[in-house]
Amino acid sequence: MIYRRRHQPIELFGSSRATGFTAHDVYGSLIVPRAVLIEMQHAAAPSVVQAWSANPPSWVSIRSAKQIDTTLPDALGAGEREAISLALELHADVLLIDEWAGRKEAEARGIPAAGTLAVLLNAAVRGDVDLLSSIEALKKAGFRLSHSVETTLMDRYRNRAKSESEKR
């Protein structure tokens, strides 16, 4: 799994403080592109992100893409371009990316992409977290989502949880 996100999600999923679980709990390992790590270490990044990136957990590896996909639009940042390129190179299971343009480019290349809410939904379906309390924790941490998105997320959770219980 390749990680490409802006700063806030690392605050949410890099440690279990806000959500009660980490990306490691859901995906096992995390590959952070070097360009993303550099962004995380920028002076303007939140201090918790700088601290995390200075000493990532053992389940995180830092990698550079051998070659950046030159067909990616210049409008994408260096982190998005390297994350997509690395995901292609490694045949990643999923690319964690919240930026809409980056997600669209990844999916156009056949890379499964997931955002913050998909990570949370997967964790809830697995029974790792309580979805409602995790949504509240995300909101307290500054994550914004509309009522309609929250309702859709809860509906998807109920449908997937029901489907999972019927399989058993």
Image: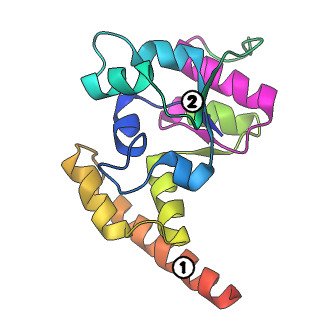
Q: Against 163, is 66 above or below?
A: above
Q: Which mark is residue 136?
A: none
Say which of 49 and 103 sits in front: 49
Q: Is mark 2 on a helix, strand or loop?
A: helix
Residue on which disc 2 sits: 102
Mark before the other along the chain sequence, 1 or 2: 2
Which kind of residue does numbered mark 2 sit on? Gly
Q: State whether residue 133 is above or below residue 118.
A: below
Disc nearest the viewer among 1 and 2: 1
Q: How far apart are marks 1 and 2 (CA)?
A: 29 Å
Place of residue 53 in the rendered image (x, y in percent of width and height, measured from the top left): 43, 22
Q: In which quarter of the image is residue 159?
A: bottom right
Q: Camera-side residue: 1 or 139? A: 1
Q: Is residue 130 left or right of residue 113?
A: left
Measuring from the top left, give residue 102's x and y in whole percent. 57, 29
Q: Is residue 103 magenta?
A: no
Q: Can residue 145 be seen in this view?
A: yes
Residue for point 45% across, 57% down: 120
Looking at the image, can residue 76 be seen? Answer: no
Q: Give the range drawn in magenta.
A: 74-102
Nearer to the camera, 100 or 120: 120
Residue at (36% x, 44% y) in the render: 12
Q: In this view, does 100 lie to the left or right of 12?
A: right
Residue 29: percent from left, percent from top: 63, 42
| Picture coordinates of residue 113, whole percent (x, y) | 62, 43
* Quadrant showing the C terminus: bottom right
- According to the picture, the residue beneath numbered tag 1 turns out to be 161
Q: Do the residues labelled 1 and 2 touch (CB within 8 Å)?
A: no
Q: In which quarter of the image is the N terminus?
A: top right
User: Is residue 78 located in the magenta-colored stretch of the structure?
Assistant: yes
Residue 139 relative to residue 39: left or right: left
